[in-house]
Amino acid sequence: MAALSPPRERGVSVRPRAALLGLLLALLLGLCTLSTAQMWTVLERASAAQERLLELTGVTRDVRALEIAALRLGDPALSPAPAPLLAEVRALSAELRGTLVMGAAERAPFAVLLSALARLDAALAGPAAGQRQAADEVAQAAQTLASALNRRTDAEMTWTQATEALGRQQLWRMTGVTALLLLALAALGAEALRERTRVVRQLEALAQQDGLTGVANRRHWDALLGHAAAQAARSGQHLALVMLDLDHFKAFNDRRGHQAGDDLLRDLAGLLVGAAAPQATVARYGGEEFSVLWPGDSAQAVAEWLDHLRREVPADVTFSAGVTHLRPGESPDEALRRADEALYAAKHGGRARTVVAP
């Protein structure tokens, strides 16, 4: 038998083969390191996006609260304007003037709002008619700015989801190339994926939940209202709407502190959710105002539920509520406006009561 040729004589030497294997191993290790770094990059971007969304949500909440306060200030029935309401408008104005969250798309409506607030400050010392007109301008400017902030929030969410989708695709491509080495790093990879999933779920919850109370936020409730109205129109069943507002909440905050005020909002949200029917949806509409979407029951039945619920709140706390139902052929916005008017009637009628709008 002929002797085997040395490896170098068979076309591939031992040393180049070892070098090639070492190069491939180094490449795989580098790709694995890169994929791990990308995981953390996605997490860092998601965390930064969450912080931006939280800040945007907080500013939007303040703008909506200013809009509601300005609408009340422009109500002829409240002339002259109550001092607590004026103080609330001034406090919200001061807080918004100090915000840094406004982007290029929000600067113009923000400038309009600041100009309207300046005119309102000047009008407060003048006749009531001028004050009401200035308050209406502030409410309209606040509504426009809130819409711009909502559009930016939606854009931020879309950008975050698109960025994560791209990162996920790149990550899986790298994972396919570095499968052997990723077996050794499976524990780290799984933990990073779980963390990323947790952040994504937090962002999804942020888009639908109020950060303080955990109930639905205004934007999610508006979407649910449209769906429920369409379903009620098809089925012919009742659809009741509730607008509920804590009485003298600012005085409560001044007396007990903002932490106690936050605790009260959380407790009320929990009480509403726990006592409402399973098919009902509770939302924080803005500030100390809550809304309830209640399919399947009449407005009068829901009003009776509210009267029973009023006995469950602490002795030094009261709330006013307006209740109505969706009429056949009526738009959700029209029904919501009636519920809001019923709430104002309850407030003007002495508070701590429920008014049912037919």
Image (cartoon, helix red, strand yellow):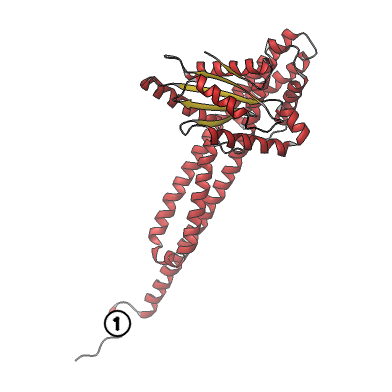
**Position above or below: 25 against 135:** below
User: In the shown orientation, is residue 249 left or right of residue 23?
Assistant: right
Relative to the observer, which residue lies in front, 326 or 223? 326
The answer to whether 77 appears left or right of 11 in the picture is right
Percent from the top left, x then y, of residue 8? 32, 81
- For residue 338, side relative to residue 74 (left or right): left
SS type, badge 1: helix
Of 288 and 306, the residue lying toward us: 306
How far from the left and from the top, in percent, is residue 33?
Answer: 49, 62
Residue at x 53% of width, y 44% of height = 202
Q: Position of residue 71 (x, y in %)?
A: 65, 17
Q: Which residue, as the protein is rendered here, is positioned at the far bottom?
A: 1
Would you identify the image quadrant in which residue 135 lies?
top right
Would residue 334 be seen by someone viewing this image from the given angle? yes
> Which of the 4 quarters of the picture holds residue 350?
top right
Q: Residue furthest right?
A: 125
Q: Residues within 10 Å of mark 1 (few under 14, many from 20)?
A: few
* Residue at which label 1 appears: 9
Residue closer to the observer: 68 or 302 = 302
The number of numbered discs placed on residues in the rendered structure image is 1
Front-lying residue, 207 or 44: 207
Give, as a three-letter code, the residue at label 1.
Glu
Residue 216 visible to an observer of this rendering = no
Q: Position of residue 177 (x, y in %)?
A: 39, 60
